[in-house]
Image (spheres, rainbow, N blue to C red):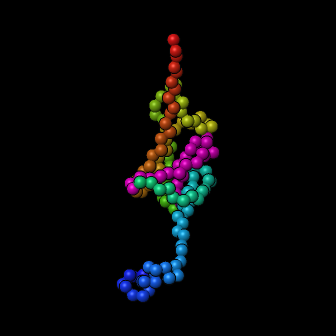
Amino acid sequence: MGDLDGDAADRDVREGAADLMVAVLLAPAAEHTCQFCSYREEAPPVRVAPGETAQRFHPCPAMGGLKVPLKPAGVRCEVRPLDRGDYIGAERVQRGRDGQTPMGFTTERDDGNDCAVLVPCAVLNIREE
């Protein structure tokens, strides 16, 4: 049935006489963990364009509240903070509770790396004369 070779069963399918079964296909939830604290979450995978990756984040109490990338459970990888190597002038950078100011985080896996950058905010003063 359903091979559309022209027999009576195929005519029944086309005319709606056959019993049909409806199935709902749900995306499996993926588990993610934080390398720095005990946070865990389950969430459906994020759809991205081919060749791109998506990373989940959470405000980590062990990193002073900074948003840290989560590791997919079962994947061998390491999340590392990147030290801010430049001078912090009047920029407004993201700081943890303990004053740490990482430039971002890298997730290093066997098949590639991801990098999340914590971009500082620019300040603009407008004066009318």
Residue located 57% across and 58% down the image: 43
- Taking the spot 44% from the left edge, 86% from the top edge, the residue there is 9
Magenta highlight range: 50-73
Task: Please count the marks in the image.
Answer: 0
Residue displayed at 51% across by 11% down: 129
Q: Nearer the viewer, residue 5 or 43?
A: 5
Looking at this view, name the residue that lies furthest to the left. Answer: 5
Residue furthest front in the image:
15
Q: Is residue 68 visible?
A: yes
Residue 61 as seen in the image, left or right of residue 103: right
Verify whether residue 129 appears in magenta.
no
Decide: is 25 above or below 124: below
* Of residues 57 and 17, the one drawn nearer to the viewer in this rendering: 17
Residue 83 percent location from the top left of the image: 49, 38
Q: Residue 72 in the image: state x and y as whole percent.
A: 52, 57
Left or right: residue 95 compared with residue 109: right
Q: Residue furthest bottom?
A: 8
Residue pictured at 46% horizontal, 31% vertical: 86
Q: Percent from the top left, x then y, of residue 100?
A: 56, 36
Q: Is residue 88 visible?
A: no
Q: With respect to residue 15, does 108 lie above or below?
A: above
Where's residue 51, x and y in %? 38, 54
In the picture, the quarter occupied by the N terminus is: bottom left
- Position of residue 100 relative to residue 123, above or below, is below
The residue lying toward the viewer, choosing from 62 and 125, is: 125
